[in-house]
Image (cartoon, rainbow, N blue to C red):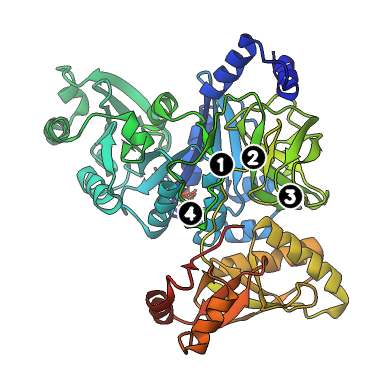
Amino acid sequence: WVAHLHRATLRLDVPPPPTVWMGLLEEVARRRNLAIISHPDAGKTTLTEKLLLYGGAIHQAGAVKAKGEQRRAKSDFMQIEQERGISISSTVLTYDYNGKRVNVLDTPGHQDFSEDTYRTLAAADNAVMLVDGAKGLEPQTRKLFEVARLRRLPLFTFVNKLDRPALSPFEILDQIEREFEITCCPLLWPIGCGDRFKGVLDRRDGTVHLFGRGVRGKQAEELETLALDDPRLEGALADSELFAQLRDDVEVLDGLIPPLDMARVMRGEMTPVFFGSAMTNFGVQLFLDSFLEIGTPPMPRALDAKSEEFSDGSIADDAETVDPTSQEFSGFVFKLQANLDPKHRDRLAYVRICSGSFTKGMKVKHSRLAGKELILSSAQSMLGNDRTTVEDASYPGDVIGINNPSGTLAIGDTLYTGARRISYSKIPSFSPEVFARCINPTPSKSKQFNKGLAQLVAEGAVQQLLERGEDVVGAVPILAAVGPLQLEVVSSRMESEYGCAVTFETLPYQHARWAMAGWDAMDQAQAAGKLMNVRKLQDQYGRPVILFPSEWRLNTATSELGESLALRPYALA
Ligand code: G4P
């Protein structure tokens, strides 16, 4: 039926047979796509690895950050990743579990790469917020939560590291509710923590899952499952204090916590909360089972909101949407990457499929290029050395890697079939906070310099700003990044991939704002003496950008000129 479906997609005039539509519906319904958001070190890599354990067949291997030798063997294509032990590029892991197709969109944890995370969240249907049980909410958790909220993603919370001394679970719920104004609905509740972590209560069916530490103290094994009212429970816990605590907790929870309401979860008003320990595998499978049951499959996706009012990345209430079970294929590019494998100079564009189905060799249209036709001769699974061509059809919620040798595809581009030209809502980026002139000390390498930089900018690895009215070619570009590490990545990639070592001269600015009202408005403000000690530049689309040396200058300008200049922390491509 896959072949059938494919024909139906291309032949618009023939309505698809009901069996074909049912097939697509089934594929959409079994897709679960999620992105994990967390502060570095909360255990995202560990949790991802454990989630994969349940997958059996891993379609895209090598994505999970492995340590030491294993790590080098898996992804030796990005030197800086090895040196720093951080995961830089977003990747996608796909596996089948209990009849569901799970796509885990990996997001870089380091704060300098939040831009990448931003884009990955645009491709996700669900966000899983991972919280370190001892630390509670941390800066990066907060920042990413805001993004997930703007994207209106249903949010699932996993509180990790309960095998270590942790904050009280009520304290964590309270912190989340207070700071994020979201109702917590704990589904898994911890029994003790640290050395006294005994297991979890599954509040959905009132069963207590007791765990024992594995032989080497690492892998936990499930010892027993008992009903909450089973008289053997107290003996099995072998800790009367914890038993009493559990009873008290249950009373409080049942009395105070509203029942799980998926409609509220879908609106981002409630988050199901799970407690466990990724490292020792406590609660991970229960979390996964529950997530697969209640997590959202691909939903209708919003088309471009025409107005700049939505430049903060939020989605308009009345935005037109495309149903994932539409016969016509559609998807958008959320990430570009070049030179994944230095032996084969290549470029890939990652496309999140939003409707219809994709098969190899398919003809699609490019929305930004006025519907120009492209033949997608191969879709690749996308990880480093283990790249393979995807032979099966892909469906909404899946991510495909498309060869992009001539750079035809850019971030945010929509691909589609069918008569109607559509464009999905744009992907915003974080406001840059580090600015530096990027210098090529070797004039004979100017060709490599320009090419490399253009590619990295197109990939979204860094933003480029120019003096007003200046042409890209020949200028000393000013790079704008979210954090200093992003510049290090540029430098490392320029050298290893384009043979051009660059140096940076940091500029004394800390914030950037786009003046969406345009150059004239900005000139007037300056003539009136209202824009002091700032630098005016233009972005790659010729739009005015103001750099501020301090938060104080920024705040003054925002309060005086925020409206008249339509100052924005970033602008959509
Ligand atoms: P990240 O991707 O979010 O940055 O976190 P990662 O999984 O790399 O985990 C960060 C550290 O936290 C690792 O320790 C990891 O083993 C530990 N960790 C993750 N989950 C748990 C948990 O449930 N309980 C406990 N006790 N620790 C956990 P490390 O010392 O940096 O590395 P390793 O030598 O243990 O691999």
Looking at the rendered structure, the kind of residue marked 2 is: Ile
Secondary structure at badge 2 equals loop
Numbered circle sitting on residue 303: 1
Secondary structure at badge 1 equals loop
Which residue is label 3 attached to? 340
In the rendered image, which quarter contains the N terminus? top right
Q: Residues within 10 Å of mark 1 (few under 14, many from 20)?
A: some
State how far apart marks 1 and 2 are (Cα): 7 Å
- Describe residue 56's horizontal placement relative to residue 214 as left or right: right
Residues marked 1 and 2 touching at CB (< 8 Å): yes
Q: Is mark 3 within 8 Å of ligand 1?
A: no
Q: How many marks?
A: 4
Q: Is mark 4 within 8 Å of ligand 1?
A: no
Question: Mark 3, mark 4: which one is toward the viewer?
Answer: 4
Residue 463, position in %: x, y?
Answer: 63, 66
Precedes in sequence: disc 3 or disc 1: 1
Residues marked 3 and 1 touching at CB (< 8 Å): no
Which residue is label 4 attached to? 310
In the rendered image, which quarter contains the C terminus? bottom right
Question: Mark 2, mark 3: which one is toward the viewer?
Answer: 2
Secondary structure at badge 4 equals helix
State how far apart marks 3 and 4 are (Cα): 34 Å
Residue at (53, 70) in percent of width and height: 517
- Describe residue 67's horizontal placement relative to residue 235 as left or right: right
State how far apart marks 3 and 1 are (Cα): 31 Å
Which residue is label 2 attached to? 422
Precedes in sequence: disc 2 or disc 3: 3
Looking at the rendered structure, the kind of residue marked 1 is: Leu
